[in-house]
Amino acid sequence: MKKIVMLALIGLMAQLIDGSLGMAYGVTSTTLLLVVGFSPALASASVHLSEVVTSAVSGYSHLKFGNVDMKTVKKLVIPGAIGAFLGAAFLSYIPSAFIKPYISLFLLGLGFYVLFRFLLIKVKVDTETDSTESSAKQMMYRPLGLIAGFMDATGGGGWGPITTPILLTQKNLTPNKAIGSVNFSEFAVSLSASIGFFLFIGWETLLWQVVVAMMLGGIIAAPFAAWLVQKLKPALLGVLAGGLIIVTNLRTILNEFFSIDLFTEISALVPLLLLWSMLIVFAVRKKA
């Protein structure tokens, strides 16, 4: 029972972060599932199946709050779904013992990116459309969706961290519409990845109690996150998510490559947690 509650809280926290930032559901939840012993393929499959439901609820919530630009969604969704299916096929045929530390390296990089993106960069929004610049950037949407979908399925996360920053540079999209559009299109990406995992690793390998628990947590958080994206400082959630991703994946990397458990190395863990705490304080005080 305690494990089910913990998994539900993982789903709730991951969806709260994802719905507010436009990224990090897959990265956060996959990271935590890898820490508790899941193989990369099983972790990613479980995350994507739970995300089919949570992203549907999140997308609908963002739509109701007016956070979705359908023109953007149409350009991203089909390439994203194709990329996710291919990523699921790729990951299913790679031995988990070999790929796990490299997936953690990818997730660690995303963690640093989340910190950098939401703590150090100030996004300027111009609601007036520059047609030349907008058209040039929109030409990138299809390959962007394909790459982001592939990386999302292989790493258990990546759709939001790759697509959201590009959309945030669009002068005709406000931050809430960029984030809402990413969340809305994520349903098709998660569904496509789940179909790929079902075909290549089978239904019977999934731990359904994990999937259902994470679904419930995500469903609870989704409507609140869609509202929160208009109210809360992105920097704060970015630092919380990025720090969690960095610490947990750094532990996996040190353990796999150097046989060092970060959580028992107090001399290394304490400064890391202290630095994280300082960044949280900085994020709280950040004006924009």
Image: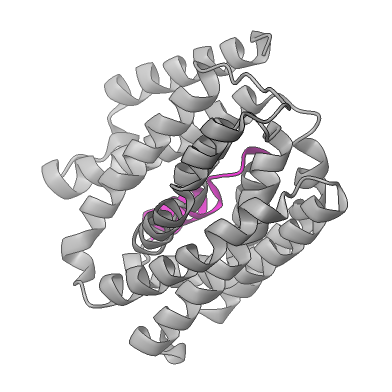
| Residue 56 visible in this rendered orientation of the protein | yes
* Residue 1 in sight here: no
**Left or right of 89 in this view: 6:** right
Identify the residue at image location x=42%, y=54%: 148
Q: Residue furthest right?
A: 64
Tell me the quadrant of the picture where the N terminus can be found.
bottom right
Question: Horizontally, is 177 left or right of 83 in the view?
Answer: right
Residue 228 point in image, percent of width and height: 79, 37
On the rendered image, what quadrant is the C terminus found in?
Answer: top right
Residue at figure coordinates x 58%, y 64% from the top left = 3
Picture coordinates of residue 18, whole percent (x, y) = 62, 46
Whether 27 is among the magenta residues is: yes
Q: Is residue 223 left or right of residue 183?
A: right
Q: Nearer the viewer, residue 153 or 122?
A: 122
Towards the viewer: 76 or 44 = 76
Q: Residue furthest front?
A: 132
Answer whether residue 222 is magenta in the image: no
Residue 106 lies, in percent from the top left, at 30, 46
The magenta-colored residue range is 20-36
Question: Residue placed at 43% from the left, 60% from the top?
Answer: 149
Query: In terms of secondary structure, what is the magenta stretch mainly?
Result: helix
x 62%, y 38%: residue: 21
Image location of residue 81, percent across then percent down: 49, 69
Question: What scheme was used to colour the molecule?
Answer: one colour
Count of numbered tags: 0
- Please say if 108 is above or below 56: above
